[in-house]
Image (cartoon, helix red, strand yellow):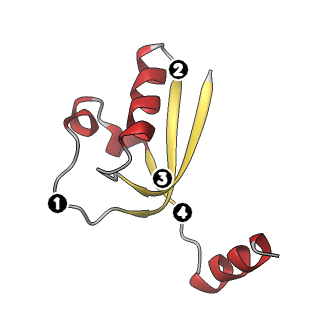
Amino acid sequence: MRIAMIVDRFPALSETFVLDQITGLLDLGHEVEIFARGSSDETVVHPAVDRYDLRDRVHVLDIPVRHRRRSVERESL
């Protein structure tokens, strides 16, 4: 099965639950692609990021700031 994970930033060390879901799906044989609004600027990453070559699965979305703001404004209505 092909699965898309949509996250704010990747990799984020504080979001181990997302990493656990991704690696668990990969272990089950699924094809996982990660779509992020931006890349993390953290210098320390979880070892699983390198073990599973997750950086090769990340697609950083180029969403202009003004469109992100509109999206947030609509969600709060």
Q: Which of 33 and 42 is in front in this view?
A: 42
Residue that mark 4 sits on: 61
- Which label's residue is closer to the chain start, 2 or 4? 2
Residue that mark 1 sits on: 43
Q: Which amino acid does label 2 sit on?
A: His
The C terminus: image quadrant: bottom right
**Image location of residue 72, percent across then percent down:** 68, 75
Q: Residue at 54% of width from left, 70% of height from top?
A: 62
- Which label's residue is closer to the chain start, 1 or 4? 1
Q: Label 3 neighbourhood size at 10 Å, few (<14), some (14-19), many (20+)?
A: some
Q: Nearer the viewer, mark 1 or mark 2?
A: 1
**Element at label 3:** strand
Q: In which quarter of the image is residue 61?
A: bottom right
Q: Which of 40 and 63 is in front in this view?
A: 40
Q: Residue furthest front?
A: 76
Q: Are marks 1 and 4 in contact (CB under 8 Å)?
A: no
| Direction from residue 69 to residue 20 in the image, left or right | left
Q: Which amino acid does label 1 sit on?
A: Thr
Q: Are marks 2 and 4 in contact (CB under 8 Å)?
A: no
Residue that mark 2 sits on: 30
Q: Is residue 1 above or below residue 41?
A: above
Q: Are marks 3 and 4 in contact (CB under 8 Å)?
A: yes
Residue that mark 3 sits on: 59
**Image location of residue 20, percent across then percent down:** 39, 31
Q: Which amino acid does label 4 sit on?
A: Leu
Q: Which amino acid does label 3 sit on?
A: His
Q: In this view, does 52 lie above or below 65?
A: above
